[in-house]
Image (spheres, helix red, strand yellow):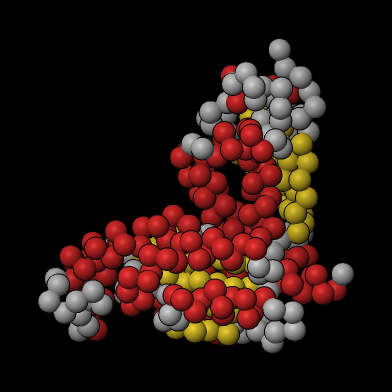
Amino acid sequence: MKSATKKASRQFVVITGLSGSGKGSVLKAFEDLGFYCVDNLPVDLIPMFAELCATPGSRIERAAVVVDIRGGEALSQLPEMYRGMEGLHLKTSLVFLEASDHALVRRFVETRRPHPLGRDLPVREGIRLERMLLKPMRRLADAVVDTTKMNVHELRDFIQARFGRLEKRERMLVAVASFGFRYGVLPDADLVFDVRFLPNPQYVPKLKPRTGRDPGVKRYIDSFPETREFTKRVTDLLLYLLPHYMREGKSYLTIGVGCTGGRHRSVAMAEKLAERLSREGYKVKVTHRDVGKTSA
């Protein structure tokens, strides 16, 4: 039991994003948190390094690596490699840093550095091309951080709030409960999210008798872009709010996720949000108040 907890606590963070967006400052923040940090690790070596960190008995329990456009053409392999880490005994996270074109240009001018994609390339054109090349990684990111208006100290505070103090996270219990608005709003919820805007499996004959726990129902709901966008935005919001709740001494938080009948959409989304929060080190329990009720 003890070793399983230790495995689950092993963290592996991949940091990427636009040149000039603050990756060096973020890596320093992880170093201050006690992470083993590597800058500009060749893409081909990332899976081997991750396996080394996941190996039982490894002294590297928390690692953070920066990989970016300096990796050249090999960078295109990174999305597939990152997905492949899911089978390891690691809690993986991908942090993507970006900023507005104006802010990035100003930073390049201030440091008098050319864009990494080429000295002969105008900085704005380099930024545009880099955004396009990094788009697949941005879509996979667990956290997209816009550093346009952030200074070094604010960026460090964000990283410490998001990735530090795992012990405190484990002491906070987050209850995620699905419900149907038809049967009334969850009375004891601290936060309520309404997912009735998502496509309803109720109107798909083969999915109607199933619930949101069913893999087919989950695939149907996940197939829509609004589901992915909602999941990302709500996860980012919760990961911002939870450390503040803990700072105020709150040790128990109930999150309600509601749809019309509490059978399909709310159940699937509650499970998804719970899984995301669990991956971030929070102690989570999931309940489905109305999943067994039948609707006309």
Q: Quadrant of the C terminus?
A: top right
Q: Is residue 16 left or right of residue 289?
A: left
Q: Is residue 38 above or below residue 247?
A: below
Q: Is residue 17 above or below residue 139?
A: below
Q: Is residue 75 left or right of residue 119?
A: right
Q: Position of residue 268 (x, y in %)?
A: 66, 38
Q: Residue at x 38, y 65 (%)?
A: 76
The answer to which image quadrant residue 105 occupies is bottom left
Q: Is residue 221 above or below residue 271?
A: above
Q: Position of residue 138 (x, y in %)?
A: 42, 59
Q: Residue at x 73, y 41 (%)?
A: 177
Q: Is residue 293 left or right of residue 112?
A: right
The answer to which image quadrant residue 151 occupies is bottom left
Residue 15 in view here? yes
Residue farthest to the right, as pictured? 1
Total number of numbered labels? 0
Q: Position of residue 159 (x, y in %)?
A: 53, 72
Q: Quadrant of the N terminus?
A: bottom right
Q: Position of residue 71 (x, y in %)?
A: 36, 76
* Viewer-proximal residue among 109 and 36: 36
Q: Residue at x 12, y 76 (%)?
A: 120
The answer to which image quadrant residue 148 occupies is bottom left
* Viewer-proximal residue among 176 and 202: 202
Residue 160 in view here? no
Q: Residue at x 43, y 80 (%)?
A: 42
